[in-house]
Image: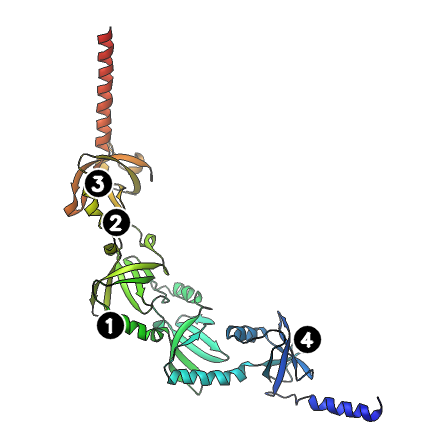
């Protein structure tokens, strides 16, 4: 190559080099994905840049393709800022932000539902970042199934529940838009508006729905129908038997069938037990006074022990009916989950009562044993 050709080559090479200044738009191609970021070739080899890990994660969440060979436009952040290995730091978020903001404004004006993924949480709700556009989803605007219901209002527990929602997809509507600061307020409840209105239009006592448990409290289960309508299954409507622990009948997220039993002043009362046969209509057909049945011991209380009678019906054997000897604690004569024989001494389905006695069974067994002993003695005497 002679001098003329060399100078010409230098000129051609110089033409390809862009003015390296802040905010300059450059074309780039992905060379390599590393833990330190995405290494890119800028302006066909003019210089090498890097997209930092924090932005990489954000771009991947937004569905931007960063596989090797992909070509896009980016912005040079600052030519004076280089990473530890001397790469220029580039960003495509600002360029994407412009297009994304137009989409969001359009969604707001046309009342469209959009999908967002929270990246942070605070005590008041969830935070969203879409290429630098900030969104806030307040606690009050969460759908019932996501609302962090905490009976004692413990802020630490509320915050923990919110942290569990980070990274999940949410269908929302934009209810407020600040164009100057590129900020927006979001609502999951509003995204469910049409579904909620449709359900409320047809809602009446007697309707049966499949719902999702959205809260568990000491007084019952909260169940969401269709995502946006919430009702309460009071503890008395969970099952026909005694409910010792509400948590034993479901957890948040479980699917359950419920029946509407009340709808007044916007409050919906639901029942789970009314969707299955009443055990008290079966019990009189299966048992009668005088029957001696083997029952399972399920719970101790200071005044006796509960045994499982039928289905989820548990009934008390009073302390006075546990033994023919004085008993101050049921654990003195019984063990949990053991099978014991008890006699039905009262059966009143109308008032939903059963009287049981273990003592009478033992007394009868003693009498039988005594009779057998006397019979054996009589047999021996007769034989002699």
Among the two numbered marks 3 and 2 on one chain, the one whose residue lies closer to the N terminus: 2
Tell me if residue 378 comes above or below residue 148 in the rendering: above
Asked if residue 48 lies left or right of residue 275, the reply is: right
Question: Would you identify the image quadrant in which residue 154 lies?
Answer: bottom left
Residue furthest toward the top? 384
Sooner in the amino-acid sequence: mark 3 or mark 1: 1
Q: Distance between the Cα atoms at labels 3 and 2?
A: 20 Å
Q: Nearer the viewer, mark 4 or mark 1?
A: 1
Q: Residue tagged by mark 4?
A: 85
Of circles 3 and 2, the one toward us is 3
* Disc 1 target residue: 201
Q: Which of pointers 1 and 2 lies earlier in the amino acid sequence?
A: 1
Q: Nearer the viewer, mark 4 or mark 2?
A: 2
Are discs 1 and 2 less than 8 Å apart at CB? Answer: no
Residue 206 percent across, percent down from the top left: 21, 62
Q: CA distance from mark 4 to mark 1?
A: 63 Å
Where 115 sits versus 178, above or below?
above
Residue at image mark 2: 242
Label ID, residue 210: none
**Does any portion of residue 151 appear in the rendered image?**
no
């Amino acid at each position: 190559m002679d001098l003329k050709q060399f100078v010409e080559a230098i000129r051609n090479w110089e033409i390809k080099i862009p003015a390296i200044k802040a905010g300059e738009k450059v074309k780039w191609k992905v060379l390599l994905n590393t833990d330190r970021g995405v290494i890119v070739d800028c302006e066909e080899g003019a210089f090498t840049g890097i997209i930092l890990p924090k932005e990489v994660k954000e771009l991947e969440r937004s569905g931007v393709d960063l596989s090797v060979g992909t070509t896009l436009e980016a912005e040079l952040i600052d030519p004076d800022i280089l990473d530890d290995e001397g790469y220029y730091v580039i960003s495509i978020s600002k360029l994407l932000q412009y297009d994304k903001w137009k989409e969001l404004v359009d969604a707001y004006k046309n009342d469209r539902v959009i999908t967002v993924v929270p990246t942070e949480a605070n005590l008041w709700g969830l935070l969203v970042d879409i290429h630098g556009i900030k969104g806030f989803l307040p606690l009050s605007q969460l759908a019932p199934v996501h609302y962090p219901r905490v009976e004692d209002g413990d802020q630490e527990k509320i915050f923990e529940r919110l942290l569990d929602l980070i990274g999940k997809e949410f269908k929302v509507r934009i209810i407020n838009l600040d164009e100057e600061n590129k900020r927006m307020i979001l609502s999951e409840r509003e995204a469910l508006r049409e579904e909620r209105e449709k359900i409320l239009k047809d809602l009446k006592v007697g309707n049966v729905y499949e719902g999702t448990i959205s809260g568990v409290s000491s007084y019952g289960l909260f169940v969401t129908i269709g995502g946006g309508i919430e009702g309460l299954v009071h503890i008395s409507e969970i099952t026909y038997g005694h409910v010792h622990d509400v948590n034993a009948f479901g957890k948040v997220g479980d699917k359950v069938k419920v029946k509407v039993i009340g709808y007044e002043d916007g409050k919906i009362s639901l029942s789970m037990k009314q969707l299955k046969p009443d055990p008290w209509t079966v019990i009189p057909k299966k048992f009668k006074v005088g029957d001696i049945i083997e029952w399972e011991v399920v719970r101790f209380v200071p005044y006796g022990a509960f045994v499982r009678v039928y289905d989820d019906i548990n009934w008390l054997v009073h302390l006075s009916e546990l033994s023919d000897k004085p008993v101050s604690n049921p654990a003195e004569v019984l063990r949990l989950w053991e099978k014991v024989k008890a006699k039905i001494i009262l059966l009143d389905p109308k008032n939903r009562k059963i009287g049981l006695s273990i003592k009478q069974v033992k007394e009868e067994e003693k009498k039988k044993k005594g009779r057998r002993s006397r019979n054996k003695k009589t047999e021996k005497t007769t034989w002699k």
